[in-house]
Image (cartoon, rainbow, N blue to C red):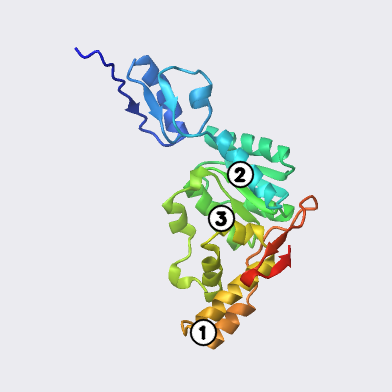
Amino acid sequence: MSAKAELILEPGPHLHAKETTARIMWWVNASLLPVVVWGAVLPDITYRNKYPEIHRVNGTMINQNEVAAKFMTGLGYKRYAVIHDTTDYGKGHNKYFSQFLAKNGGQIVGTFGVTADQQDFTAELTKVKELKPEVVYFGGLTPIGIRIKSQMDKLGIKAVFEGTSGIKSAAYHDGLGKDLADVRLDEAAVLAAAIHAPNRTFFGHSARAIQARRDWILQAMRGLDTAAESAVREAMARPLPRRAPRSADQPAHSKRGARGARVRS
């Protein structure tokens, strides 16, 4: 027999927190091999009982929501409405996002729990529209996220939609995404401007600097005969996508716009 000991692990077969939580006691009581959780983010899976058989290689919703709150408040968004499903997964996201948002100076103007199989969100979204948040945060999974975002658009709610890893899937983009053939010329130019440094392009520069970069790309397209003169004029006349206003405690910074021109943001 070899003197070298080998550790055999059984990868956890579940992505979602609900299924993983339900299986924990089965794994422990059956005295099976150690289990590695690779996708479920509910903290209780590894934090509540600390079974030596249960391991996790991914982060938790605590980490996710700390970043989510810091990122959005860092962009200047202050007023939030929270929608979450009423499973342990959704309630956990609501708990930790609310906690970290308060620490970062954000304000929750309304919180709404919805069931996992709910189809119509008119009642909740009508109240959300009245509250006029800058951001609608959703803690839940892809199917509900698609329904909520599409119904937000139908009701004319202009708030930014922020989700969690629960909606990070191809199905979300398939359900709500825009076909490449439907992208306008001005939108394509903004995307081209962002390829080199998307965070700096969208969040580090003033609107004037972003527009200057976009228009420079449009003019280059016209010069290369890849876009008609009339189409370029129409694209340059369109406004940029809406951005969050700078909060009072965010200092102005001098940034370099297109062609090295210095602009004040």
Residue 92, label in figure: none
Residue wearing tag 1: 223
Is disc 1 placed on a helix, strand or loop? helix
Residue at the disc numbered 2: 68
Which amino acid, mark 2? Ala
The answer to whether 138 is drawn above or below residue 37 in the figure is: below
In the drawing, what numbered circle is on residue 149?
3
Badge 2 or badge 3: first in the primary sequence: 2
Residue 117 x, y percent position in the rendering: 49, 44
Say whether residue 162 is visible.
yes
Q: Which one is earlier in the sequence, the residue at label 1 or at label 2?
A: 2
Q: Is residue 207 left or right of residue 37?
A: right
Taking the view exactly as shown, the residue that stands out farthest to the left is 1
Nearer the observer, 91 or 13: 13
Residue at screen point 71% across, 41% down: 104
Residue closest to the far right: 248
